[in-house]
Image: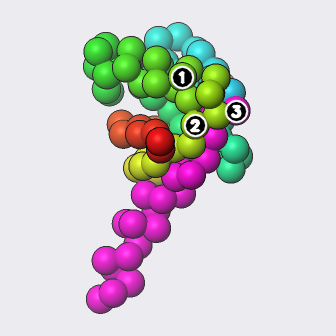
Amino acid sequence: MALSLLSPLTFANTGANQTIEQIYYCAEDFALKMSGGDWYLVQKSVVGEKKFDHFLSLSMYMMSTGKKTANIFPKEPIETWCGKSGFKPITILSVQN
């Protein structure tokens, strides 16, 4: 039972305590390459325009200052996005102080 309770937390922390190394735009979406090597995808059609703009602004701030992520809850990687694979969609992004 303890394993089932810890599994979501472990998965959620896969994106924590990393810096953003690259921001990649395609169509109306953008992806973040993290210092751990993973790519996280923010889809405007999923998060909405206001949250999308907030994520983009926060991501640019984090990238320029070297701030680390706090909580990211990535979903399973999508099959393909803009001709590439392995992008994990996110709807939550937070920054450490």
Instruction: Report whether 4 appears left or right of 41.
Output: left
Dot 3 amino acid type? Glu
**CB contact under 8 Å: marks 1 and 2:** yes
Dot 1 amino acid type? Tyr
Distance from disc 1 to disc 3, alpha carbons, whole Å, reads 12 Å
Q: How many marks?
A: 3
Q: Is residue 1 above or below residue 27?
A: below
Dot 2 amino acid type? Lys
Q: Is residue 71 above or below residue 39?
A: below
Look at the numbered disc 1 and give the secondary structure of its residue.
Answer: helix
Region in magenta = 1-21
Distance from disc 2 to disc 3, alpha carbons, whole Å, reads 11 Å
- Residue under circle 3? 21
What residue is shown at x 36% (from left), y 39% (from top)?
A: 92
Distance from disc 1 to disc 2, alpha carbons, whole Å, reads 8 Å
- Residue under circle 1? 61
- Residue under circle 2? 67
